[in-house]
Image (spheres, rainbow, N blue to C red):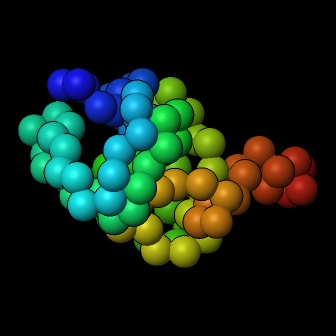
Amino acid sequence: MKNKFIIMNSEDNCATALATISKDAEIEINGNRIKLNEDIEIGHKIALKDLKKGDLIKKYGEIIGIAIIDIKAGDWIHTHNIKSHYLEKIKND
């Protein structure tokens, strides 16, 4: 499969897997080579660049979460390393 990940919007800092991809696989997205730091299941997200704790995670050009720890390019993005931006917004309104 040539395209193993899809980026929904040019502003996104994560991509979604179109198939299950093994750890240490090297992929090319938008001219950048990224090595996967763990197995990524179909439908799950990876970081396209290094992200710091507190950085906003964008998918579809929209904020979907906030990094709760530093995340490296190629890391799996899920509930273990991000929290909901929506819940934070409601809590602060």
Give the left or right position of residue 81, taking residue 90 as reference.
left
Residue 7 in sight in this render: no
Closer to the camera in the image, 89 or 50: 50
Q: In the rendering, at what x and y percent does residue 21 appear?
A: 35, 44
Could you tell me which residue is drawn at 29 percent across and 32 percent down?
4
Answer yes or no: is residue 88 visible: yes
Residue in the foreground of this view, choosing between 10 and 4: 4
Quadrant for residue 11, please give it. top left
Task: Name the residue rendered at 82%, 51% in the picture.
Answer: 87
Q: Residue at x 33, y 65 (%)?
A: 37
State whether residue 23 is above or below residue 68: above
Q: Is residue 28 above or below residue 9?
A: below
Using the image, determine if residue 93 lies above or below residue 2: below
Q: Residue at x 39, y 62 (%)?
A: 38
Single out the residue that lies furthest toward the left: 31
Please give left or right for residue 30 compared with residue 68 in the image.
left
Question: Where, by quadrant of the figure, is residue 15 drawn?
Answer: top left
Where residue 41 sits: x, y (%)?
49, 44
| Above or below for 49 versus 60 | below
Using the image as rendered, state which of residue 70 and residue 4 is in the foreground. Answer: 4
